[in-house]
């Protein structure tokens, strides 16, 4: 028997590859199937089952394409109602892969169909659980995403999750390995550890959610401090449940070089968003007007989902040469399938052709320190928890994810500084501000990390909510 975790850091997502004898199973695969197909061929094994722990919200699974290419059936837990052919398992149903077994444990709470898969080895020993979004390391799945579909309150779903954990997970042996669907950085939980594998016994000791004295306390603690889920989550659920365009078609359509003339025409005729995936420093020096910058070298796909939201939005790319296929792949993982091409020759070709360009007023942390005065307006686009730990004195805490809610409160005539932790998120904000006609600001290179090294005063938590 072999179990392999295939972890994708930019999504904080874990897929799993299980082999016994000449048969394999894959749990929660990513959208692109070629790596899995290649692995199956290399190992000379047949894919027998594709297990889905639930209808994912934060990424689009590769279950449909993988099933079509291999003939392996898709398996969901009880109550799942996908719009395509699948095996809807019963609670405690057993599936055999070679000499090992996978037992379905229905663990509703995160969603109603959420299930945990218990791995039983060749000797009949309970070895591991693939816990999906039911149990994370250090946390449990948020119970507020499925309220509308379940016709339940988040409190009721949290109570259901408590029962699932107490009745299905906690009685299992301490030595069992826990393989969760997500790790730190995922928006599917709030308190996940950086590790991606642990024992159940250690989680019983260290996971706050597993150490509550009763259901009422569990519900209160699990719901406390939950940030609003990204708005693209519901669209990803719909794609996972209802189906989507074959990834090969998405890649072929998007991975098309477009001339400058055609790029301009497409942008005007299709209403496409121009997405520039270069690094923040390069973008700041020059870009196509009205482009939005979300750098590929960062938490690219989640921020695309958070900022663009609508998965049906047509997108034109400006990317570093050779990265176009990776960009399209990572966009498709969160459901953005409507890339209609990329600018041939990238931004340099646009600049060389003498086309209009724009730039961001980016300054160093040292310049910020020199220009900063008491009562200077500073907008901190980090998360509330980051701001709470430490921030520039009198800075306003305005999370990037909520920019559409606070951008209208800005006085376009009053200068302000904008920063995040290291410059990635503040450049996203800067590109959006510029595109909305707000230009009287300075974006701080290196963010709070560099600001702390200067003489600018910082404070402990002092929430600033008004601009």
Image: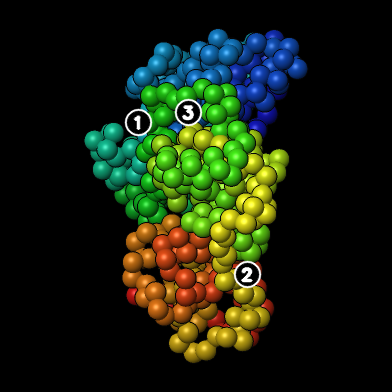
Q: Which residue is pictured at 46% across the width and 79% down the height?
A: 415
Q: Callout 1: few (<14), some (14-19), or many (20+) C-alpha neighbours within 10 Å?
A: many
Is residue 18 shown left or right of residue 304?
A: right
Q: Callout 2: few (<14), some (14-19), or many (20+) C-alpha neighbours within 10 Å?
A: many
* Residue 292, image x, y percentages: 51, 54
Q: What distance separates the C-alpha of mark 3 from that of mark 1?
A: 11 Å
Q: Which residue is pictured at 55% across the width and 29% down the height?
A: 253
* In the rendered image, the vertical position of residue 388 relative to residue 16, given as above or below: below
| Sequence order check, earlier mark of 2 and 3 | 3
| Sequence order check, earlier mark of 1 and 2 | 1
| Residue 53 marker | 3
* Residue 361, image x, y percentages: 57, 71
Q: What distance separates the C-alpha of mark 1 from that of mark 2?
A: 45 Å
Q: What distance separates the C-alpha of mark 2 from that of mark 3?
A: 41 Å
> Which residue has dot 1 on it?
112
> Which residue has dot 2 on it?
445
Nearer to us: label 2 or label 3 = 2
| Sequence order check, earlier mark of 3 and 1 | 3
Q: Callout 3: few (<14), some (14-19), or many (20+) C-alpha neighbours within 10 Å?
A: many
Q: Quadrant of the C terminus?
A: bottom left
* Residue 49, image x, y percentages: 55, 15
* In the rendered image, the vertical position of residue 403 relative to residue 59, given as above or below: below
SS assignment at label 2? loop
Q: Quadrant of the N terminus?
A: top right
């Amino acid at each position: 028997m072999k179990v392999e975790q295939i972890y994708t850091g930019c999504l904080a997502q874990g897929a799993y590859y299980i082999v016994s004898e000449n048969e394999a199973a894959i749990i929660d695969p990513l959208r692109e199937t070629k790596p899995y197909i290649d692995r199956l061929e290399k190992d000379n094994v047949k894919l027998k089952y594709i297990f889905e722990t639930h209808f994912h919200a934060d990424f689009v699974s590769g279950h449909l394409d993988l099933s079509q290419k291999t003939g392996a059936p898709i398996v969901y837990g009880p109550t799942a109602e996908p719009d395509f052919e699948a095996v809807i398992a019963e609670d405690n149903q057993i599936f055999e892969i070679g000499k090992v077994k996978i037992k379905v444990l229905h663990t509703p709470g995160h969603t109603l169909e959420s299930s945990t898969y218990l791995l039983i080895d060749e000797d009949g020993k309970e070895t591991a659980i693939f816990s999906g979004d039911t149990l994370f390391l250090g946390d449990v799945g948020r119970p507020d995403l499925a309220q509308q579909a379940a016709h339940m309150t988040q409190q009721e779903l949290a109570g259901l999750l408590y029962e699932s954990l107490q009745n299905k997970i906690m009685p299992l042996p301490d030595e069992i390995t826990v393989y969760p669907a997500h790790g730190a950085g995922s928006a599917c939980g709030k308190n996940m550890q950086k590790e991606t594998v642990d024992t159940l016994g250690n989680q019983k000791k260290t996971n706050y959610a597993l150490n509550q004295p009763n259901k009422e306390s569990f519900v209160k603690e699990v719901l406390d401090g939950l940030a609003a889920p990204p708005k693209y989550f519901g669209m990803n659920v719909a794609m996972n449940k209802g189906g989507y365009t074959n990834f090969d078609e998405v890649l072929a359509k998007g991975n098309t070089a477009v001339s400058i003339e055609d790029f301009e025409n497409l942008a005007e005729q299709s209403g496409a968003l121009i997405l520039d995936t270069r690094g923040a420093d390069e973008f700041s020096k020059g870009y196509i007007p009205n482009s939005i910058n979300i750098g590929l070298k960062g938490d690219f796909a989640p921020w695309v989902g958070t900022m663009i939201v609508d998965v049906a939005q047509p997108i034109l790319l400006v990317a570093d040469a050779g990265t176009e296929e990776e960009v399209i792949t990572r966009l498709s993982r969160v459901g953005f399938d409507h890339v209609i091409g990329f600018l041939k020759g990238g931004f340099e070709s646009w600049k060389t052709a003498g086309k209009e360009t724009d730039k961001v007023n980016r300054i160093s942390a040292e310049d910020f320190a020199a220009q900063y005065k008491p009562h200077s307006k500073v907008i901190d686009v980090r998360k509330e928890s980051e701001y709470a730990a430490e921030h520039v004195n009198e800075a306003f805490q305005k999370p990037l994810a909520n920019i559409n809610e606070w951008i209208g409160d800005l006085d376009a005539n009053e200068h302000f500084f904008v920063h995040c932790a290291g410059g990635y998120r503040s450049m996203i904000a800067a590109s959006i501000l510029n595109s909305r006609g707000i230009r009287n600001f300075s974006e701080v290179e290196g963010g709070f990390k560099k600001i702390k090294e200067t003489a600018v005063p910082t404070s402990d938590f002092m929430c600033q909510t008004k601009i």
